[in-house]
Amino acid sequence: MRQSLSFQTGTNDRLAGYLFEKIKGVGMDELIEIDLIRFGFGVGLMLIAIGLSAWQRLGLEWDLAVATFRTIVQLLAVGYLLELVFALNNAWAVLAVIAAMSVIATIVARNRISKKVPRLLPIVGLSILVGTALTLAYVNLLVLQPAPWYQPQYLVPLAGIILGNAMTAAAIGGERLVSTLNASQGEIETYLSLGATPRQATARYRKDAIKAGLIPTLNSMLVVGIVKLPGIITGQILSGVNPLDAAVYQILIMFILAIATLGTTIFLIQGIYRQFFNPAAQFILH
C-alpha cells in the first residue's frame, strides 16, 4: 500500500493546514473529484449565506463575498504552488515554502500580541521557529522517517499544521502576558521592592499566559472524536482511507500539536517578560 500526503491551508484567524492522505487499497472507494459543476454548487453555499445575511440585515454581505473570493483565490494559488513544489521534490524548494509560512505566521502573531513591545517580532519568530523545527525534526527522524527527509508530501503539510497552531498559541499566550503585565504594575513593583527578581515577580503571570496559549489545543484533545471530527481525519476518510488508519494519524497530529504549541508558548513567554524590565530590574510599561 502506497501512501502520500497533500496539503491544504486557509487564511482565516490562523494559518493552518491539514493532512490529506490517499490510500488505494482493496475495498476502498475512489476519491470523488470536485469538478466545476460540483464546485459551483459548493459556492452556492456562500451565496445562500450572503442571502441570509441580507434577509436578516446583518450587514455581512460584503465581508462574506470578500472572504469567499479570497478563500478561492488563495487556496487555488496554494494548490498550484504546492503542486510545483511536489513535482520539483527539492529540499530548497520545500524549505522556502516552510520559511514563507513561518514569516507570515510570525507577523500575524506579533500583530495580535502588541506593536509596542520592543524586539517582539524576532522574539515571536524565533519562538515559532524553535518550536516548529524541534517538533518537525523529532517526527521526521523518529516517527515517519521519509526518504528523503525533505519529502514534500510529508514535510510541508506537517509544517503547515504546526505553524498554524503555534501561531495561535503564541498570539493568545503573548497577548495574555502583555495585557496582564501592563495591568499589574503596582503588584509587580511591590514584589520588586520586597527583593523579588523580575522572574519571581512575574512567575504567576507567565504561568497563566502559557496555560492560556494551550487552551485551544487541550480543548481539541479533550473532545476529539467525541464532539467533532477534525479536518485531518475528515479529509482522510473522504479520500478513501480506512477510518482506523485515519484515527492513528489524527492521534499523532494531536500529540505533535501539543508539544509544538507548548514549546512555542514557553519560549515566547520567556522572551516577552524580559522586555518589561530594564538592566536595573525596573518595571517598564509597554
Image (tube, rainbow, N blue to C red):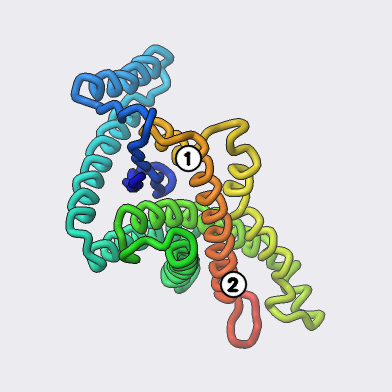
> What residue is at 51 percent from the left and 44 percent from the top?
250
Q: Quadrant of residue 286?
A: bottom right
Give residue 263's quadrant in the image: bottom right
Give the answer, above or below, for where 45 lies relative to 87: above
The residue indicated by pointer 2 is: 270
Which residue appears farthest toward the front when viewing the image? Answer: 26
Instruction: Name the residue rendered at 43%, 51% in the picture.
Output: 161
The amino acid pointed to by label 1 is Ala
Amino acid type, label 2: Gln
Badge 2 element: helix
> Residue 156 appears at what percent x and percent y?
34, 56
Of all residues, the one furthest to the right in this rendering is: 194
Classify 259 as above or below 189.
above
Mark in front: 1 vs 2: 1
Residue 95 percent across, percent down from the top left: 29, 65
Give the secondary structure at mark 1: helix
Q: Which of the image's four quarters has the N terminus?
A: top left
Image x and y of residue 19, in percent: 40, 45
Compared with residue 285, is residue 77 higher up or lower down, i.e. above or below? above
Question: Which residue, given by chain and number where applicable, does mark 1 sit on?
Answer: 246
